[in-house]
Image (cartoon, rainbow, N blue to C red):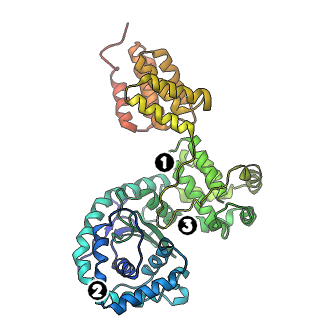
Amino acid sequence: MAMTLALRLATSAGAQGTNVTVTPDLRLFTTMAALNAAGFDVEFGSQYHPVREAIRKYASEVDPDLISALKAFYASHKGRETDEQQFAKYISLAVNITDAPNFKPLTRDEILPPDARSVIGFADLMREFYDKAHLSQHWLELRPDYNRVISAMAPVLRSLLVRTDAYMRVPLGSMASSSMSIYLELAAPVNTVNVRSNQDSYFVIIGDSANPRVDDIRHAYLHFQLDRLVTLNANRIQGAADLLELVKKAGGVDTTYTSEFHVMATESLIRALELRMDRVAVSRARESIDTFYRAGLLLTPYFYDALEGYEKGDVGIRDAFVEIARNIDLKAEQTRFQQTFYSIPAPQKSVARPEVPQPPPTPPANPTRDLLKQAEAAFNSGDTAKAQAAFEKVLTEFDREDGAAMYGMALVASRKGDREEAKQYFDRTVRSDSAEIGMKVWSYVYLARIFDIECNRGRALEYYQQAVKLGDDTRNAQAAAREGVQKSYGEGCEK
């Protein structure tokens, strides 16, 4: 037998590790090889990954009758659906059967997930294809490709889990009865992310990608950590059924969130957590919250606000959530729904993550965003006048409190040597609700440097210390702030 590379992702120094592993899986490899022989084809670019190119040739090693049987099964179960829509069924089948060479269902057919059960007959064809296409030998030949990708991916995933656990203050060993397997399948379509769960076992199937789909993987990991927590505390939420009833007949709502309260509540919590962990500027966060809310995640606004208090405490999310759930006010949420739900445009598509990611839709017109991009490009290329005109247009015609535009005006003033105007705009930036935290921390540093130049060391220290207190390290801001605390900026102040 070949030795399997399965990396257990430790979450902190001295820990034994979590029940999260990243590994290839022979069941998935066999499924993809048989699927490609059966006619499955999703184009995500001009070239496949070399592994996928290789497995598409295996059909030539198999007798035509078996290939015909594979194609007939796939076509008969496809109907009018696309290959993308079919893909999830076969992935579900792969994680619900035993290892090679048997490929038998893990449970009785009637207990299998409905999508896996609908294609269970494919497992018999997989078993025959595995034998006649000599997949055990091909698997050994291709394993080094999987191992290289996994070795490169592991540090990124480890860092992702460490940061996520740190935010949630998750105690070590708290998920001992659950497991999450991240399966890399290079023969799957590029950028594939497919999530499956079976009681306490979670599976994330990922294809090759230039950059690991960390947001999707983190989303799955948050479900792994929080699904049971929310389900166990759902009875603490007063009027849960009444809250769900609000959206059952509303247009534009993702029906995933209208059948069971704990599903809607868990997804609402996760979306709020993601916005908080990513430290999204408040104005942008509110836009996202509106989108989630209109899609049926009615508790996202509440959880987002509640997490502000959680961040100031020191208890973990498991303990904090008990009180957060208990404090949900049905009447307040009903009022919120009546006042805001239908004022938000219905989303054109569900906000749920696709099984096979589709090309992103063209973003709606956003003149503020476009002007800010133009201003940033002009400033970086040295065209200060053009940058200033674009920043000013944002502030005068669209949003006079736009944090990014104010920060841009401060940088323009600094470049022009107008310290007084720079101070005014940097000060407005740190007070802005919409400025990103990286803009705020550097505004403190720049203000401190200006006061150093003006021989006001006391004020300079105040601003350096504010930058340190803020904690953000965009473009090494913390090193700049600490250096400013130790030593005055520049070679000397201007008398």
Among the 4 quarters of the image, the one containing residue 36? bottom left
Mark 2 lies on a secondary structure that is loop
Q: Between tags 2 and 3, which lies in front?
A: 2
Few, some or many C-alpha atoms within 10 Å of disc 3 (few <14, some 14-19, many ≥20)? some
The amino acid sitting under disc 2 is: Ala
Which of the 4 image quadrants contains residue 22? bottom left
Q: Residue at x 61, y 32 (%)?
A: 398
User: Could you say where residue 458 lies in the image, as x and y percent from the top left?
Assistant: 44, 18
- Give the amino acid at mark 3: Asp
Cα distance in 3D space between marks 2 and 3? 40 Å
Q: Which mark is residue 227?
A: 3
Numbered label attached to residue 278: 1
Tell me which numbered mark, 2 or 3, is placed earlier along the sequence: 2
* Residue 419: x %, y % from top left: 45, 16
Judge by depth and name the residue closer to the eye, 152 or 325. 152
Q: Which residue does the numbered mark 2 point to in the structure image?
A: 133
Q: Are marks 3 and 1 in contact (CB under 8 Å)?
A: no
Q: Is residue 332 visible?
A: yes
Where disc 3 sits, the SS reads helix
- In which quadrant of the rendered image does the C terminus lie? top left
Q: Is residue 426 left or right of residue 234?
A: left
- Of badges 1 and 2, the one in the foreground is 2
> Label 3 to label 1, Cα distance in Å?
21 Å
Residue type (three-letter) at the residue carrying disc 1: Asp
Secondary element at tag 1: loop
Q: Residue furthest bottom?
A: 65
Residue 103 visible (yes or no): no
Q: Residue 477's x, y, as percent? A: 38, 34
Tell me which label, 1 or 2, sits earlier in the chain.
2
* Residue 490 rendering spot, x and y as whole percentages: 32, 18
Dot in front, 3 or 1: 1
Count residues near mark 1 (Cα–Cα under 10 Å), then give few for <14, some for 14-19, many for 20+. few
